[in-house]
Image: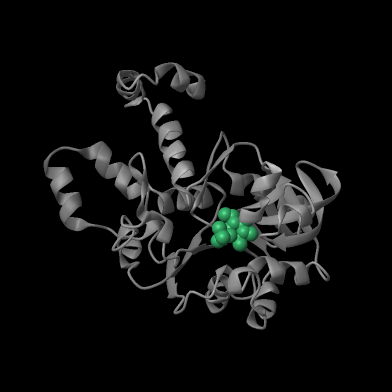
Amino acid sequence: MVKRVKTAVFPVAGLGTRFLPATKAMPKEMLTVVDRPLIQYAVDEAKEAGITHFVFVTGRNKGVIEDHFDRQFELETTLETRGKLKALEELRQDLPSAGRTSFTRQQEPLGLGHAVWCARDIVGDEPFALLLPDMLFKGRRGVLKQMIEAYETTGGNVIAVEEVPHQEVSSYGVVGRGAGTDGGFAITEMVEKPKPQDAPSNLIISGRYILQPEIFSLLADQPRGAGGEIQLTDAMQTLMKSQPFAGVKYDGQSFDCGSKVGFLAANVAYALDRDDIAEDFLAALSKLGLIDGMKVAAE
Ligand code: G1P
């Protein structure tokens, strides 16, 4: 029997420089896809996968994320008096249960590996999920849920991967593929942001991980890697010497909302999927002369 994954870590300390000036005073994780902040999608995905403890590694100017996952009595009372009970119910559903959130700070921007390490005392000696909220996944079943299902068979560490055009690999962590099926194969190596000619494949690390707690002691001594940052990928590459890592090619579509184009594409795809606005949105797009292209995207 593998140990159940109950805790998820959300690194939300990044500065969001690619979205300035929107992110000057507002965390990038609060940017909305239609009307839900990116961080809410990641929390929803974790909840769907059975996660019960939500750990946020924040930084300066990120207080609004904590407020977002709190009750807002004035707003709730107003919605109640105005009879907006559905909206009220939905707001309450978005919240993790009382006492099930933890917040810690990454005091310096030293990289993803360092951010994860900052959660070590809160996570303790347990396997945990790690979700990078920039990556948004749309599909019938959440990516983390699919990974947990794979983990129940494989144990060890599990990473969601996807194929990208070869020239794009240098923006990501890249894995080497060993034996297995798309639903779970052995990872043979990992490299952070390789040059396309040095990449072991075009399978990238997509921002969802299930990790064993031994990663923390490796992160504690991890020298700086790509971009001068403490890289999680480098510590995972070391952990691979003593523990298995499985890659899972998930079912669904991903949007890299850390880039403007990915973020805008996510907004279009999610809007076209919403019963309450899809029709009006298509009409608005048609005024822009875009409707034919959009119809194809909506199918
Ligand atoms: C991080 C990881 C990288 C992964 C990517 C997914 O990079 O270091 O391995 O492929 O997230 O978005 P970052 O986007 O922080 O540069």
Give coordinates of residue 16: x percent, y percent: 42, 60
Is 1 on the left or on the right of 192, as rendered? right
| Residue 30, quarter of picture | bottom left
Q: In the image, is residue 134 above or below residue 84?
A: below
Give coordinates of residue 236: x percent, y percent: 72, 67
| Residue 4, quarter of picture | bottom right
Give coordinates of residue 25: x percent, y percent: 28, 63
Could you tell me which residue is drawn at 41 percent across and 51 percent down?
A: 40
Q: In the image, is residue 73 above or below residue 181?
A: below
85 and 178: which one is in front?
178
Q: Is residue 156 visible?
A: no
Could you tell me which residue is drawn at 60 percent across and 45 percent down?
A: 143
Could you tell me which residue is drawn at 67 percent across and 51 percent down?
A: 169
Residue that extends furthest to the right in the rendered view of this protein: 179
Q: Quadrant of the N terminus?
A: bottom right
Q: In the image, is residue 187 above or below residue 165?
A: below
Give coordinates of residue 226: x percent, y percent: 64, 68
